[in-house]
Structures are given as structure tokens and as C-alpha cells.
Image: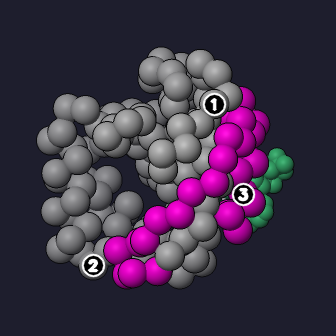
Amino acid sequence: MTTILLRDVTESDLPIFFEQQLDPEATAMAAFPSRDRESFMLHWRKIMADESVILKTILFDGQVAGNIVCWETLSEREVGYWIGKEYWGKGIATKALAAFLVLVKTRPLFAHVAKHNIASQRVLEKCGFMFVGEDKYVNPRGGEVEEFVFKLGADESYRLSH
Ligand SMILES: CC(C)(COP(=O)(O)OP(=O)(O)OC[C@H]1O[C@@H](n2cnc3c(N)ncnc32)[C@H](O)[C@@H]1OP(=O)(O)O)[C@@H](O)C(=O)NCCC(=O)NCCS
């Protein structure tokens, strides 16, 4: 039987996460452009040093399959995840998010997902998140991304101030 484990992120995971976020199919799904090595490392060292950010490495049978992260915006706590392409379609994101939700008990918890990212929407739904609204944002390359907003916990309202 395969196992999914979450553990703290180590410096040696970063080159693997870097490669995983280079994949064009993955960046298209997430509607988020890949970072070059320098900005990727800068970003990860910054979030690893930030005590308000919770980061976990996802291990699949001991291999680094991806990461799952929770961070604060001005008004919300958000969750996001990224799985390396060779690990897709094995239920890893769903199991990793379910395990993460046991560790991170803050509610409500939000996720913003590109409208075309059906896989990620399924992951959220299977973990109990509810669709609560729509949003838009401009990604770092200047592309406007239409998103669905999902929420776990508290109630199903979504502040329309976004
Ligand atoms: C989205 C992502 C996290 C899914 O990871 P995963 O481990 O393959 O997901 P799971 O195996 O747990 O599958 C979850 C559901 O999505 C479905 N799914 C998987 N890939 C799919 C695809 N390409 N298109 C449609 N549905 C898909 C699965 O069938 C499953 O649904 P089901 O139980 O109804 O059959 C992964 O593809 C990824 O990291 N993509 C790039 C980054 C990204 O999009 N992150 C999320 C940003 S919000």
C-alpha cells in the first residue's frame, strides 16, 4: 500500500519543487507562471522564514511528490498545493490536503482556483470545501485570471469586497 506523509520542508526539497513548477502543463493548470531559479529560491527562503506561513513537503512512498502551503492575506487564510506531474492522478493531492487539514485547524480556510482547473476543484470538493464565489486576479506576468473561490468551515458566506 502506498503512503502519503507530510513533513516540514527542507532546503534539499527546493530544487525538486523548482523543477516541478517549471512544467508548462502545470503552470497552465494553475494559471501561475513558473519562476526562474533565483526568484524561486528567494521566494521560498522568504516564506520558509515567515512564521505565519505553514509549509509541508508531500512524500509519496518516501519521494518528494510536491508541497502544500497555507498563508495569510489581509482578510483570509489561504491554502495552495503543487504536485509534480509524474505523481498526478494517484489521489496524492486529495490525501495530502486531507492530512494538512488535520494539522491546520484554522477555519474558515479559502482556496482560489482558476476556473479551468477542474482537478484542483475536485481536490477541494473531496476535502469538504464549498464553492462560495468568483474572483479575478492579475498574475505576475500580467495575465488576468478568472477564479472560483472555495471555502472550508465557519459558514458559506464570502465577502463581496474582493
Ligand atoms: C491540481 C493537482 C494538485 C491535482 O493533483 P493530483 O494528485 O493529480 O489530484 P488527485 O489525484 O487527488 O485527483 C483529484 C481529482 O481530480 C481529478 N483529476 C486529476 N487530474 C485531472 C485533470 N487533468 N483533469 C480533470 N480532472 C482531473 C481526479 O480524477 C480526481 O477526481 P475524482 O476523484 O473525481 O476522479 C495537480 O494536477 C497539480 O499540482 N497541478 C499543478 C498545480 C496546481 O494546479 N495547483 C493547484 C492550484 S489551485
Compute the Cα span from label 1 to label 3.
24 Å
Q: Closer to the camera, 75 or 109?
A: 75
Q: Position of residue 48 (x, y in %)?
A: 21, 44
The residue tagged 1 is 157
Tell me the element at label 1: loop
- Indicate yes or no: mark 3 CB to ligand 1 under 8 Å: yes
On screen, residue 54 versus residue 107, left or right, reads left
Tell me the element at label 2: loop
The residue tagged 2 is 36
Kind of residue indicated by mark 2? Asp
Compute the Cα span from label 2 to label 3.
25 Å
Q: Which residues are magenta?
A: 114-143
At horizontal 70% and vertical 51% (from top left) the residue drawn is 121
Kind of residue indicated by mark 3? Ala
The residue tagged 3 is 119
Q: Is residue 115 magenta?
A: yes
Q: Which numbered disc flags the more N-terminal residue, 2 or 3?
A: 2
On screen, residue 148 versus residue 69, left or right, reads right
At horizontal 50% and vertical 76% (from top left) the residue drawn is 144
